Image (cartoon, rainbow, N blue to C red):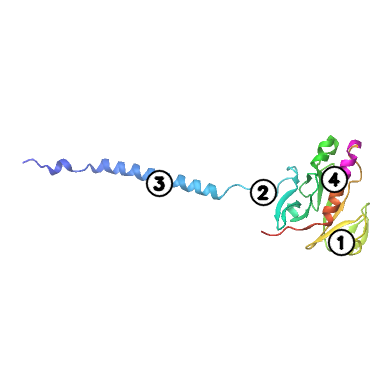
Amino acid sequence: MVNYMSRFNPNNKGFGAVEGVLVLVIVLLLAILGWVIYKDNHKTTVSSTAPATTVPSTVSSTSATSGQTKYFTITQWRVRAPYSGNLTLEYLPPTGNEIYLSSTQLDASNPSCGLNQTGGGYGGFIERMSSTQQMTNSVGQNTGQTAAQFYSSNVNSPGIYVAHVGSYYYMYTPSNGFCSQNSVSLQKQTMSAFENITKSLQAVPFQ
């Protein structure tokens, strides 16, 4: 008598190989899906410790309750000031407690006016000081005043551009010379913008 049941017996060895391939494909698909999700949730961000040779920061625009207000923002110091002028203001990332200032228009006016760490800001510079830091004069001599004392006695003095934000004092110093004879007017406009900005500095709101 023919044993018909034996004809329908599955080949256990062949079935195991097919099953193994299917499991491997599923595992690979899950691994690929997991990698894609991980990559989307961990996008690379720019380091806050970028070198001084990075592209200068420019005026940023941020919303305000009365519409759209432009601000000159020093991101590393978390301070800003409203600015509505026509110049595109910029700065290099801080070196210590100073930032060099300029405008893209001044940079473009003459090769010698370019913003760089070694030769300028020909728009001047802003220095950040703690309240107890000793003030020095233009030749580096100690004035006998702390930054807090200097601010208290000079905050409204003409020709002094200083602001108090949080635990720091910010003082603007204009460039001590002109980068090019044909750029004098533009350089004066740039420095004037930073004079007003320094006096109007405020903390960047936390969002």
Question: What label sits on residue 190 in the rendered view?
Answer: 4
Tag 3's secondary structure?
helix
Closer to the chain start, of discs 1 and 2, is 2
Q: Distance between the residues labelled 3 and 1?
A: 64 Å
Image quadrant for the C terminus? bottom right
Q: Position of residue 167 (x, y in %)?
A: 79, 63
Q: Which amino acid does label 1 sit on?
A: Ala
Whether residue 124 is situated above or below residue 144 in the rendered picture: above
Quadrant of the image for the N terminus?
top left
Mark closer to the chain start, 3 or 4:
3
Q: Is mark 1 on a helix, strand or loop?
A: helix
Near mark 4 (Cα within 10 A), the count class, few <14, some 14-19 or many ≥20, is: many
Q: Give the amino acid type for the residue marked by disc 4 in the picture.
A: Thr
Residue 161 among those drawn in magenta:
no
Q: Give the range drawn in magenta.
A: 181-188
Looking at the rendered image, the disc whose residue lies closer to the viewer, 3 or 1, is 1
Task: Mark 2: give few (<14), some (14-19) or many (20+) Cα within 10 Å.
Answer: few
The span from disc 4 to disc 2 (Cα, nearest Å) is: 29 Å
The residue where tag 3 is placed is: 27
Q: Distance between the residues labelled 3 and 4?
A: 62 Å
User: Does residue 186 belong to the magenta stretch?
Assistant: yes
Q: Earlier in the sequence, mark 4 or mark 2?
A: 2
